[in-house]
């Protein structure tokens, strides 16, 4: 099977969903409503192409002047004015549109492709070309002529359309690929996405993928489950019997010697029950040989280090030595796939073997497409397991008391290997924290209830509920004496 030559786009994530990049010499329609990011995407590709030593031609059939375009592009890091007029040429076809219409535009394109020796052609204003003729055959002839001249010169073509073209339109039958950008209002959030509606010769990642516009231009975050449909490596079978210290000796005993290596453990409980505290204790055993990551979505690094210090957990020296890396996600509007990819990139860069995620419930709330949370977390946990990472994560529940467990993901238990339930219990006019192991995959464990005791010199689990019933319901009732 012959591999098609590819053209790197320079847009993070785009080459991934295109299965390697734009097919060299192919033609694509990039469509979307005004403001969806088409012009930024096209210019980002063009400037990357020019920076790589190639030549690009940007032809506009719109009335907007190039100076105004450059003014807005200058705010983005990829814009390099020194390349304008050299490797990257901007040409207006507005005058040709007022002459004999599309024939004059084709003549201009043919001439400029040859004169500029361009290997990338971008035509902005396909909608204007459509409105210049009432005959569908004319637009087909226009695209066919552009493709013919571009193919002769070995030139890849991007046609920008300022609206969504209907599936039955002649343009879509002519091109090799259709890239659609959209922007949707979800609640009070505006979410940008990209979809590959058509890709010839590519095993592309179809469906919707989130994107954002940053100071560096467009960044696409491919759906994690589409990229990691299968883990990048087999899970380390030899580690199944190995154990990792949790940082709390009593918890290690409940697990029969520690957390199973390369496993995922989820702590379920309401706010204040000690989930973050147990996570900080888990990170105390990070080393340079086996570093760790604190992936936080609640408290910033400064507050977390102060909390660890107040608990007698020496985490700051681990951070300074490089044994522990703290990644905090600011409380802005988050994209679930951006979080997933950032986490995996950090694991790859640091070689982390311990990971505390605080919390998975915040990541779940970042999802903008209902019903995909399970697939996302399943792919994430499988990939972390394949990378020999032992994961401890938290999930915040609404109810402080009660026997029911409410989580947004019904199949939550199947996502993780081990499950801890944490609750408050009222006992003798005091609120106490209680911990119980609900599940340890393929291993024996101690199901007894333990009280989580938090002191200035650390944390511990004690056997305070041996003579108490109904503790997990929040009401500790001492056994009646007989």
Image (spheres, rainbow, N blue to C red):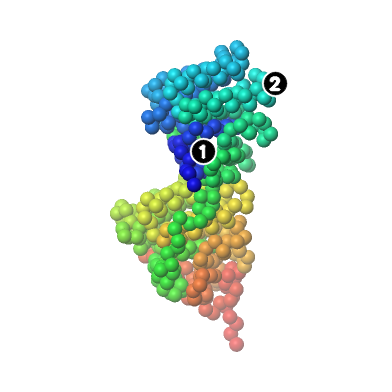
Q: Nearer the viewer, residue 351 or 438?
A: 351
Q: Residue drawn at (62%, 41%), measured in percent from left and top?
A: 186
Q: Quadrant of the C terminus?
A: bottom right
Q: Nearer the viewer, residue 71 or 453?
A: 71
Q: Can you give x and y, in whole percent of width and height, for residue 359 in the image?
A: 50, 55
- Residue at the image point whose x is 58% and y is 85% from the top: 481
Residue 382 x, y percent position in the rendering: 49, 59
Relative to 145, does residue 469 appear above or below in the rendering? below
User: For this rendering, which residue is in front, 218 or 359?
Assistant: 218
Neighbour class for label 1 at 10 Å: few (<14), some, many (≥20)? some
Write down the residue under mark 1.
Answer: 212
- Residue at 57%, 55% (x, y): give it: 375
Q: Is residue 194 above or below residue 258?
A: above
Front one among 341 and 226: 226
For discs 2 and 1, the disc positioned in front in the rendered view: 2
Count residues near mark 2 (Cα–Cα under 10 Å), then give few for <14, some for 14-19, many for 20+. Answer: few
- Residue 7 rendering spot, x and y as whole percentages: 45, 36
Where is 44 relative to 257, above or below? Answer: above
Secondary element at tag 1: strand
Pinpoint residue 421: horizontal percent, then vertical percent. Answer: 54, 66
Q: Residue at x 52, y 63 (%)?
A: 416
Q: Which of the 4 quarters of the picture holds residue 136?
A: top right
**Which residue carries the number 2 mark?**
134
Asked if disc 2 and disc 1 are in contact, CB closer than 8 Å, the reply is no
């Amino acid at each position: 099977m012959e591999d098609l030559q590819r053209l790197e786009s320079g847009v993070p994530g785009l080459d991934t969903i295109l299965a390697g990049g734009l097919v060299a010499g192919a033609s694509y329609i990039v469509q979307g409503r005004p403001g969806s990011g088409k012009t930024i995407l096209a210019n980002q590709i063009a400037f990357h192409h020019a920076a790589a030593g190639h030549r690009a031609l940007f032809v506009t059939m719109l009335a907007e002047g190039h100076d105004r375009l450059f003014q807005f592009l200058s705010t983005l890091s990829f814009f390099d004015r020194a390349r304008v007029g050299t490797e990257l040429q901007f040409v207006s076809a507005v005058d040709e549109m007022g002459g004999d219409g599309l024939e004059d535009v084709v003549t201009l394109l043919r001439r400029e492709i040859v004169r500029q020796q361009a290997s990338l052609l971008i035509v902005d204003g396909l909608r204007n070309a459509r409105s210049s003729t009432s005959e569908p055959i004319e637009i087909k002839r226009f695209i066919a002529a552009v493709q013919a001249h571009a193919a002769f010169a070995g030139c890849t073509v991007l046609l920008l359309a300022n609206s969504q073209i209907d599936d039955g339109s002649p343009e879509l039958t002519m091109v090799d690929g259709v890239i659609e950008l959209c922007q949707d209002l979800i609640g009070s959030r505006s979410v940008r996405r990209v979809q590959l509606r058509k890709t010839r010769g590519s095993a592309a990642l179809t469906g919707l993928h989130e994107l954002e516009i940053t100071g560096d231009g467009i960044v696409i975050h491919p759906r994690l489950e589409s990229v990691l449909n299968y883990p990048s490596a087999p899970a380390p079978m030899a580690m199944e019997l190995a154990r990792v210290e949790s940082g709390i000796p009593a918890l290690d005993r409940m697990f029969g010697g520690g957390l199973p290596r390369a496993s995922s453990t989820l702590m379920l409980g309401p706010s204040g029950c000690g989930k973050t505290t147990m996570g900080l204790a888990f990170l105390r055993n990070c080393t340079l040989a086996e570093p760790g990551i604190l992936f936080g979505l609640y408290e910033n690094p400064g507050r977390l280090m102060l909390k660890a210090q107040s608990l007698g957990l020496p985490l700051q020296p681990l951070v300074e030595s490089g044994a522990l890396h703290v990644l905090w996600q600011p409380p802005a509007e988050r994209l679930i796939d951006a979080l997933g990819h950032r986490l995996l990139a950090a694991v790859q860069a640091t070689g982390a073997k311990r990971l505390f995620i605080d919390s998975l419930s915040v990541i779940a709330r970042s999802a903008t497409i209902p019903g995909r949370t399970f697939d996302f977390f399943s792919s994430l946990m499988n990939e972390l397991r394949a990378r020999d990472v032992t994961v401890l994560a938290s999930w915040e529940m609404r109810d402080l008391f009660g026997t029911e467990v409410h989580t947004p993901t019904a199949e939550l238990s199947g996502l993780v290997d081990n499950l801890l339930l944490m609750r408050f219990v009222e006992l003798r006019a005091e609120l106490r924290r209680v911990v119980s192991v609900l599940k340890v995959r393929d291993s024996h464990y101690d199901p007894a209830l333990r009280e989580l005791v938090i002191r200035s010199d650390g944390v511990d689990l004690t056997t305070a509920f041996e003579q108490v019933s109904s503790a997990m319901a929040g009401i500790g009732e001492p056994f009646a004496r007989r």
